[in-house]
């Protein structure tokens, strides 16, 4: 069977749409067999290149001519009569879409407030939230684990971390849950609602600072970098909310689904809970929730993996595909799930200057949540066929929209 028969194509480009995303690990594996980079069509008809090989992914993530800001690429194309249409998730002025020196300034200021100490201090509260969500379930029954556990846990953590009032948590969860589903009908309204909420909160924290991350971001000042502007404050908060919430929701879902499909691995993790921190790295490698990087743009003609990428082209790195291609310490088949794998290698948090600022928080939440879930639900199984599960159909996030399970709580 040819690659064109195995993966959907249009006008010579692989179409990374809903059908592709539902079967993404297998589809990316087929692409890798034919090379580390391919022309692709993404959501909303946007076209560019997708990098699927691990070594080339690492190269692309730090390539000096691949920029997050599309302006240089757009200027390069303007003289040739082309117009570059940049996809935007509408997160405002923040570091994910900036290059040095602006990225350096924004990241340094945000990192000054989002410290390892602040993350570590969250551990008892994360565990308390996880137990509370399990306590709210009937002792025996069926539930959608996404709605009952996976989504409310990180939403509550990031809301409390930022200092969002409890009476606004419902709106916050609703908007943050739709903000990265770029092709969904409620995407723009969700972004607008979230932006308005955070802008109001920034103004409140400036008047009445509290012991929370948003107040710390308002207060942080650097002699060289100054301080974050109002637009940058809201943009940075939007980035932390959207990236931190949706990625963890779906990492939990992908991890639980993988365990339910591999009962030997589930049994091993129950018997040896001390493996959980390493198992989280394996989940990040095996089926990461951030399936693809945000877009980069070629500011000049470049060569990637022996392929000429013209200036102005959009380049996206398939982080999940790279994880299945990464050589692992001690060998072992990277296509298999192994929760005891030592030091699983992956690019789930990116590579280089854009390495995820919230990686330590994601690890803390996932390790704690999965440990509590497995200890409190000694019996759990899928309540629907795997084939019937509906996957997020657009954007950079990979995960199921619902995860129906039957369980017995302990």
Image (cartoon, rainbow, N blue to C red):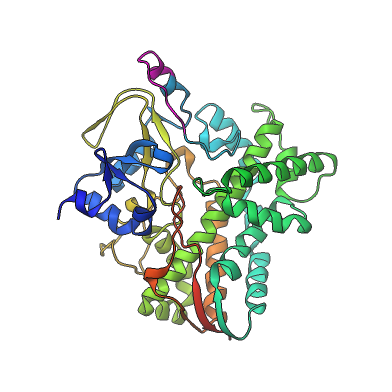
The quadrant of the image that shows the C terminus is bottom right
Does residue 192 lie above or below 63 as drawn? below
Identify the residue at the far right of this view.
208
- Please identify the dominant SS of the magenta region: loop
Identify the residue at the far left of this view.
1
Which region of the structure is painted magenta? 75-86
Q: Using residue 232 as the reference point, say whether residue 299 is left or right of it.
A: left
Identify the residue at the far top of this view.
79
Does residue 309 lie above or below 389 as drawn? above
Does residue 302 lie above or below 19 as drawn? above
Residue in view at x 31 percent, y 42 percent: 51
x, y (%) of residue 143? 56, 76
Does residue 260 lie above or below 158 as drawn? below
x, y (%) of residue 409? 58, 84
Residue in view at x 67 percent, y 67 percent: 124
- Observer-nearest of 40 and 235: 40
Q: Using residue 319 as the reference point, say whether residue 400 is left or right of it.
A: right
């Amino acid at each position: 069977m040819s690659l064109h028969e195995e993966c959907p194509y249009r006008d010579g480009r692989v179409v990374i749409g809903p059908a592709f995303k539902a079967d993404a690990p297998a589809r990316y594996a087929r692409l890798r067999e034919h090379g580390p980079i391919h022309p692709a069509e993404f959501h909303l008809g946007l076209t560019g290149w997708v990098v699927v090989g691990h070594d080339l992914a690492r190269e692309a993530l730090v390539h000096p001519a691949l920029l997050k800001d599309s302006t240089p690429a757009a200027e390069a194309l303007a003289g040739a009569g082309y117009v570059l249409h940049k996809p935007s998730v509408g997160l405002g002025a923040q570091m994910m879409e900036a290059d040095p020196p602006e990225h350096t300034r924004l990241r340094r200021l945000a990192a000054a407030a989002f410290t390892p100490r602040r993350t570590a201090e969250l551990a008892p509260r994360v565990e308390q939230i996880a137990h509370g969500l399990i306590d709210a379930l009937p002792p025996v029954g069926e539930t959608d684990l996404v709605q009952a556990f996976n989504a409310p846990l990180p939403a509550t953590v990031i809301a409390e971390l930022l200092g969002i009032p409890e009476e606004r948590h419902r709106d916050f969860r609703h908007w943050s849950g739709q903000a990265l589903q770029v092709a969904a009908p409620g995407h723009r309204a969700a972004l607008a609602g979230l932006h308005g909420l955070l802008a109001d909160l920034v103004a409140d924290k400036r008047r009445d600072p509290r012991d929370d991350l948003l107040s710390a971001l308002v207060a942080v000042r650097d002699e060289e970098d100054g301080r974050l502007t109002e637009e940058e404050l809201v943009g940075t908060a939007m980035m932390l909310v959207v990236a931190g919430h949706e990625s963890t929701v779906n990492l939990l879902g992908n991890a639980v689904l993988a365990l339910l499909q591999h009962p030997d691995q589930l049994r091993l993790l129950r018997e040896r809970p001390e493996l959980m921190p390493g198992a989280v790295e394996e989940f990040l490698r095996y089926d990461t929730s951030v399936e693809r990087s945000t877009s980069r743009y070629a500011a000049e003609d470049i060569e990637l993996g022996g392929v000429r990428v013209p200036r102005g082209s959009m380049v996206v790195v398939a982080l999940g595909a790279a994880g299945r291609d990464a050589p692992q310490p001690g060998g072992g088949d990277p296509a298999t799930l192994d929760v005891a794998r030592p030091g699983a290698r992956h690019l789930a948090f990116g590579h280089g200057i854009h390495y995820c600022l919230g990686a330590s928080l994601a690890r803390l939440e996932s390790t704690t949540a999965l440990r509590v879930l497995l200890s409190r639900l000694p019996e759990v199984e899928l309540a629907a066929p795997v084939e019937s599960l509906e996957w997020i159909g657009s954007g950079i996030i990979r995960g199921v929209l619902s995860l129906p399970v039957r369980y017995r709580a302990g």
